[in-house]
Image: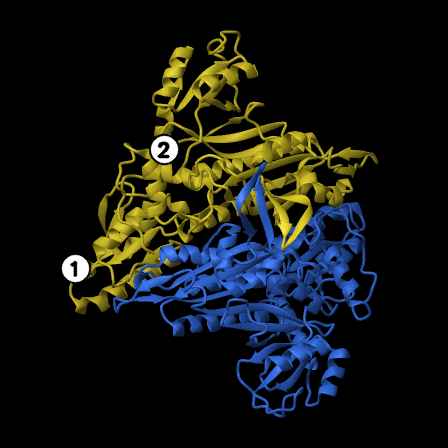
Chain colours: A blue, B yellow
């Protein structure tokens, strides 16, 4: 499919324009004809499939089962939990007609499925024998975003998974909330090579309807934080209005304890932002649709057949070893054109093979992340390639970790706090008295919110950065996407 | 999750009620709180996951890539192909508001994605180098069904895949239409164990917007046909209004040739109807979420530990051999209760193991389809189980094939035709002059439509069954779901 070639701005000079060009020119997505919506083109969808495969296995191994609930939710369901309703209703797409007829009750395109899931759980759960219920949904959700669309990060429809669990006890539900956060951490740090801060949201920032929300927060190169996934302890906030009760071993009725949690395709946006460079996308091998691309090189037509035959043999050998490989045997493009295309698409390694390489029983392998080129014997290529892919994965994570650490500043004074937020951005580690008023004032002054209250509480090292009263928490502030 | 136990009617006596009870009591689905919508509970979703896995691999091997397009389609897109619009508009769910604001243009919840896909293709396709485009979507679609809901067969939202391809030539597009039908046939006959008639739809029955539609038609036990999947040759019907053009090697502009095709979760309904019996569901092993359930049997508490240990060992051994096995080690239910539950859920085989079996180094294996029980040595269980599962798969297909053949009648006279349709139903093989008027009159008289015009044309054996004029085709009529 046709794209303009090459990114025309530098990542360090115009980050926003750079991002927009990368997601388009790497053919990750396209704008759809409706404001706020994008098309997930095959290349981003394949990244999503790799993310899904990893997470789906982890969730199933932990006892979760997938299901599918309707995309439409009656307005009356949304209204049952008051905070939830008021939180979501401004951005709901409403269905009001079918064919030529009006509907009695408006139907919301799901902004999230807690309410319709709870309606079913109230029918399905009768006894302690029915618990726990551990269900996960892979679907898309709809939120009418008023302000600017940003592919993957801010669109009116995005893909995600949403888990919805019901438990007999508070303790078991809380264990689930933390266990899911750990699975998410593994996904993001080990697969996407993106280091995150783990923590709890404040009351102002938690999910509408939850008792508390756990979060992972990543840092983007422009100094803004990006929420990478959340896990909510719903307590009995939904089980009471929806009357989800079970008969316990004690022969008494109890409301269940619930959790919900999700990660979305915005993670793809984070991968682009953190790992990409001036040549385009750079993909961590573990989620790359293609881990290695083979570009045959020949100048004389009589070499074509022998080079292609050897390239196919190499592709088969790599494929058998579990490496995702693509042989770019198109004759309508030059090798140089292909190099640029696959660099733009962030394929972790490229293999060049020509007549002289074949004669020497070797190929030339380039790393996308460092640009380094090495000659590798064909005999040892599968093993060497595996090691190189592991090295790229580790190196991308290490670089992102350094960038994250450089973007954490500690502030004791509000002046310094404001200077950091206005300046290089990033996380500001600061002490907070715990009052919502201080949190709100800081947001009003600076646009920064409390991204996380660390799971392992740190001892306050100063008084509240705003009011100067005794601090209760060390927290991480940032502006965020 | 709580269900009432046991089906209370016989399949042969009240087929419709039997079906409703099976899909509910086997926990395949539940009615959602919105008219026409169902919840795909984990058990049916897992069947769908198995179907997806098979089909996804086949489609990818044939060069298709997955993507995701928005669930909302502007009304103006739908209007671009006139037949398509008038065909779908009576059953569209319309979004008219977001938050508290009205929308300028109504947005349709996708009834199918041709129009929004074509909008993108018109931007993506510029040159012959960009062709073919072979994209598949896994999503759900929305059709406001006016008449009675029937889980899996007739609901307002269902899961499916929709393929959308664009080609440089008519020949290549037509080859794709037939190649997809063959992949679908393999899915349905070899995985779901459901034999089908292959053929073309008449103009009256084809997809609105297609030049022609290929179809697979299965026969249900109540004598009604069920369309199992369709593959459409769109010709240039969409590429012209959407201006999808490519610059050919001849340096001239050409409109692309297109196809679209889909199979849906209604296939699950067909599996229930054809293979199920008075005890509930019967699943073909190749799509069964659980192929073998192990029920430990012990009467004395001191046996519990040794029986469970052996059962786990067997489960691991079977799992390692690629058999999907579930050890039902719940202590709150009796073995008899478990037998009933897994029979209702159609698990192909059951393994019973107790202290005496362990002493004899054997287990008792029951087949769900025949009820047959055999003793199998633990040492040879994985191999024997594989053979048994293959035998069950083959046997279910053979039985369904016999039932299909019994339900094909040949009619030369219209009287006999009507008697058959009114009586036992099934397919009536008859000769047709090719005129839409005769087709329409037969539908009006009997409710039967032409389900397929066979791909391999048969020589007419009589004159048109209605008008008595010279026949052009031998076709298969039936009433249908």
Label 2: state its secondary structure: helix
- Same chain, marks 2 and 1? yes
The one nearer the camera, A243 or B5, is A243
The reply to whether callout 2 and callout 1 are in contact (CB within 8 Å) is no
**Near-viewer residue (B351 or A475):** A475
Relative image position of residue B246 (x, y in whole percent): 77, 38
Find residue B292 and report its horizontal and vertical position in percent. Answer: 32, 52
**What secondary structure is marked by label 1?**
helix
Select label 2 or label 1 by which is in front.
2
Which residue lies under the disc numbered 2?
B400
Alpha-carbon neighbours of circle 2 within 10 Å: few (<14), some, or many (≥20)? many
Residue B253's place in the image compared with A127, above or below, is: above
Q: Is residue B253 left or right of residue A386?
A: right
- Give the residue displayed 57% in from the left and 27% down from the top: B206
Residue A89 disc label: none
**Picture coordinates of residue A237, whole percent (x, y):** 45, 67
Residue B75 falls in which quadrant of the image? top right
Q: Earlier in the sequence, mark 2 or mark 1?
A: 1
Task: Give the residue pinned by disc 1.
Answer: B356
Q: Distance of mark 2 from mark 1, alpha carbons?
A: 38 Å
Asked whether, in this view, residue B19 is left or right of residue A357, the answer is left
| Residue depicted at x 49% and y 54% | A76
Up/down of A449 relative to B232, above or below:
below
Q: Is residue B271 left or right of residue A479?
A: left
Instruction: Give the position of the N terminus of chain B as an image quadrant.
Output: bottom left
Query: Does residue B86 appear anywhere in the picture?
Result: yes
Closer-to-camera residue (B362/A307):
B362
Residue occupying the far top of the picture: B469
Q: Position of residue B192 (x, y in %)?
A: 42, 40
Q: Is residue A362 above or below residue B351?
A: below
Which corner quadrant of the image does residue B311 belong to? bottom left
Q: Chain of mark 1?
A: B
């Amino acid at each position: 499919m046709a794209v303009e070639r090459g990114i025309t701005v530098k990542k360090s000079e115009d980050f926003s324009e750079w991002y927009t060009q990368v997601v388009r020119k790497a053919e990750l997505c396209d704008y759809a004809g409706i404001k706020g919506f994008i098309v997930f083109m095959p290349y981003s969808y394949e990244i999503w499939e790799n993310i899904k495969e990893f997470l789906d296995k982890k969730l199933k191994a932990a006892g979760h089962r997938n299901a599918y609930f309707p995309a439409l939710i009656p307005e009356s369901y949304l209204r049952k939990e008051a905070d939830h309703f008021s939180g979501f209703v401004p951005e709901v797409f409403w269905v009001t007609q079918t064919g030529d007829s009006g509907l009695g009750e408006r139907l919301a395109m799901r902004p999230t499925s807690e309410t319709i899931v709870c309606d079913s759980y109230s029918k399905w759960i009768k006894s302690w024998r029915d618990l726990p219920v551990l269900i996960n949904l892979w679907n898309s959700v709809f939120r009418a975003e008023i302000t600017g669309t940003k592919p993957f990060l801010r669109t009116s429809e995005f893909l995600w998974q949403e888990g919805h669990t019901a438990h007999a006890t508070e303790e078991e539900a809380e264990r689930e909330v933390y266990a899911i956060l750990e699975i998410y951490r593994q996904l993001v740090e080990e697969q996407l090579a993106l280091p995150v801060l783990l923590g709890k949201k404040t009351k102002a920032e938690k999910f509408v309807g939850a008792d508390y929300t756990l979060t992972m927060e990543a840092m983007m190169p422009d100094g803004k934080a990006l929420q990478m996934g959340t896990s909510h302890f719903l307590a009995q906030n939904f089980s009471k209005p929806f009357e989800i009760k079970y008969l316990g071993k004690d022969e008494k009725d109890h409301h269940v304890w619930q959790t919900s949690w999700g990660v979305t395709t915005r993670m793809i946006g984070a991968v682009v932002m953190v790992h990409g460079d001036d040549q385009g996308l750079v993909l961590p091998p573990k989620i790359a649709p293609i881990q290695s691309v083979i570009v045959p090189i020949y100048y004389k037509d009589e070499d074509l057949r022998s080079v292609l035959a050897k390239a196919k043999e190499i592709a088969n050998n790599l494929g058998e070893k579990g490496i995702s490989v693509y042989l770019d045997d198109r004759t309508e493009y030059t090798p140089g054109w292909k190099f640029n295309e696959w660099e733009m698409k962030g394929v972790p390694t490229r293999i060049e093979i020509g007549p002289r390489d074949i004669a020497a029983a070797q190929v030339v392998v380039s790393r996308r992340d460092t640009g380094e080129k090495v000659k590798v014997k064909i005999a040892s290529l599968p093993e060497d390639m595996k090691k190189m892919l592991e090295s790229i994965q580790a190196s991308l994570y290490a670089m992102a970790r350094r960038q994250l650490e450089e973007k954490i500043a500690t502030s004791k004074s509000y002046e310094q706090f404001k200077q950091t937020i206005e300046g290089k951005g990033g996380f500001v580690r600061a002490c907070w008295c715990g009052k919502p008023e201080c949190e709100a004032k800081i947001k009003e002054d600076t646009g920064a919110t409390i991204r996380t209250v660390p799971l392992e509480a740190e001892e306050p090292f100063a008084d509240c950065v705003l009011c100067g009263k005794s601090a209760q928490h060390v927290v991480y502030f940032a502006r965020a996407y």
